[in-house]
């Protein structure tokens, strides 16, 4: 069982330990054996370990797991220093050192937000939310908003990537099947015709020529097939390559408008989260601009400049051409109610649903086209293999 122990050692501050032991008494004895003076030990404590998952190794995933752990421990009633001490003992990765640095800074009287900023491990969005939460004493709520925001962003990215990757995977699999037929099946059919006497039909001669070409250049054909498969799939898996492909696809007006909406959804939602955290609108716009690609950041800068020049939110968004028709109406409604944040969240939700539906419609069009292309390719190979047999059978009759 897991036993939570509050203890002190030497002249240190009280420490919280999570111990694996058969019983509370055994946990006490193990702690005392390591020099701790046990203040309290309990087995039935409220701690949601279901949200604590092993880090994936990627920096952003590791950050989210760390924040989830931090949030879960805060909700369980631990102080910030106790949380950091616990995380150091629970983890064995790069974030252990980060937790140690944060704890040392807090013991020196430095605020959590300043300590997080000094490590360089935390994004400005999270640091700003924590800084605002320090004033209002709402750190668990701020972390929960950040985690919810990141989960929604990851879900939207996953939807877009999955829908765009599926037809490419189909094409790649179809290409590999054609490669298998060409290198393994076609040569065996060709041997049938090589042993025949007399003049062969043109289809059989074409198959023999194709088989000879494949046998002479089989390595090159295999390499070409692998390169084609990799070229179709891998660029969508590697983030940097995916960004370049999206930039290239963005040259098409229809796709460009959807890519722009995708980034605006993230921007609206990020501003809404920051406003909910108590950060003023101009600062929220500036911080949220970090989630935008370079081709939209200058427009966000125009929005920020308009806000600082005294424009109303809706006019500032229009000044930078960053308000869709729906967002404009919702922001205007938010101005009248005095709360723009929830309206931006509604605009993000509306456009996210719209984008998902557009992608689903696109998939319904692309899927039969891709399947038809694969069918034509594989069918062409099969016809080339069997057509000479049919022609020879007709000649014999």
Image (cartoon, rainbow, N blue to C red):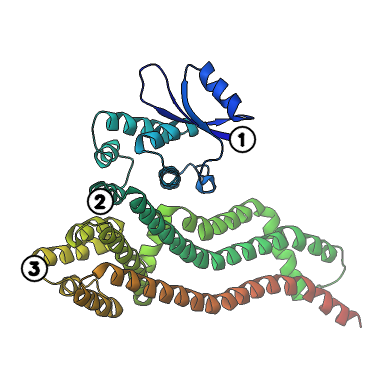
**Closer to the camera in the image, 397 or 17:** 17
2 or 3: mark nearer the eye = 2
In the rendered structure, the answer to whether residue 295 lies left or right of residue 371 reads left
Alpha-carbon distance for marks 3 and 1? Answer: 60 Å
Q: Report the quarter where the N terminus lies.
A: top right
Residue 325 at x, y = what percent?
Answer: 28, 80
3 or 1: mark nearer the eye = 1
Assess whether mark 1 and mark 2 are in contact (beta carbons under 8 angstroms).
no
Q: Of the residues under marks 2 and 3, which one precedes in the sequence?
A: 2
**Where on the picture, by quarter, is residue 375?**
bottom right
Numbered disc 2: secondary structure: helix
**Where on the picture, by quarter, is residue 74?**
top left
> Can you tell which mark lies on residue 160?
none
Query: Is any part of residue 94 visible from this angle?
Result: no
Residue 32 in the image: above or below residue 178: above
Which residue matches tag 2? 136
In the rendered structure, the answer to whether residue 246 lies left or right of residue 226 reads left
The residue furthest right is: 397
Q: Could you tell me which residue is drawn at 46 percent across and 61 percent down?
A: 155
**Closer to the camera in the image, 80 or 347:** 80
Q: Report the quarter where the C terminus lies.
A: bottom right
Q: How many neighbours does mark 1 have within 10 angstroms: few (below 14), some (14-19), or many (20 or more)?
A: few
Which residue matches tag 1? 1
Q: Of the residues under marks 2 and 1, which one precedes in the sequence?
A: 1
Which residue matches tag 3? 310
């Amino acid at each position: 069982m897991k036993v939570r122990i509050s203890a002190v050692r030497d002249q240190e501050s009280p420490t919280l330990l999570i111990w694996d032991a058969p019983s509370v008494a055994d946990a006490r004895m193990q702690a005392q054996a390591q020099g701790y003076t046990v203040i309290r030990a309990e087995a039935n404590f409220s701690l949601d370990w279901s949200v604590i998952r092993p880090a994936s190794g990627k920096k952003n995933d590791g950050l989210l797991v760390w924040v989830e752990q931090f949030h879960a421990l805060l909700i369980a009633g631990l102080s910030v220093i106790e949380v950091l001490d616990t995380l150091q003992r629970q983890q064995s990765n790069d974030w252990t050192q980060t937790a140690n640095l944060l704890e040392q800074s807090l013991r020196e009287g430095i605020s959590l937000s300043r300590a997080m900023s000094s490590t360089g491990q935390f994004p400005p969005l999270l640091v700003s939310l924590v800084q605002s939460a320090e004033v209002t004493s709402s750190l668990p709520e701020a972390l929960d908003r950040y985690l919810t925001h990141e989960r929604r962003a990851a879900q939207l990215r996953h939807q877009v990537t999955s829908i765009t990757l599926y037809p490419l995977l189909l094409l790649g699999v179809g290409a590999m099947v054609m490669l298998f037929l060409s290198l393994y099946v076609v040569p065996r059919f060709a041997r049938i015709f090589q042993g025949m006497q007399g003049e062969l039909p043109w289809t059989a001669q074409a198959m023999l020529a194709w088989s000879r070409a494949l046998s002479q250049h089989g390595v090159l054909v295999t390499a070409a097939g692998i390169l084609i498969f990799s070229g179709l799939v891998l660029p969508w898996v590697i983030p940097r390559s995916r960004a370049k492909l999206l930039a290239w696809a963005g040259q098409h007006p229809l796709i460009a408008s959807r890519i722009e909406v995708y980034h605006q959804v993230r921007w609206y939602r990020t501003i809404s989260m920051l406003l909910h955290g108590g950060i003023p609108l101009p600062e929220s716009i500036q911080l949220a601009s970090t989630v935008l690609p370079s081709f939209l950041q200058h427009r966000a800068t125009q929005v920020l400049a308009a806000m600082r020049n005294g424009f109303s939110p809706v006019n500032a968004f229009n000044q930078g051409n960053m308000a869709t028709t729906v967002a404009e109406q919702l922001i205007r409604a938010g101005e009248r109610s005095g709360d723009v944040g929830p309206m931006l969240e509604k605009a993000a939700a509306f456009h996210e649903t719209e984008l998902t539906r557009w992608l689903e419609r696109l998939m319904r069009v692309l899927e039969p086209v891709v399947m038809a292309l694969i069918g034509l390719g594989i069918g062409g190979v099969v016809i080339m293999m069997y057509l000479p047999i049919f022609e020879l059978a007709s000649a014999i009759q």
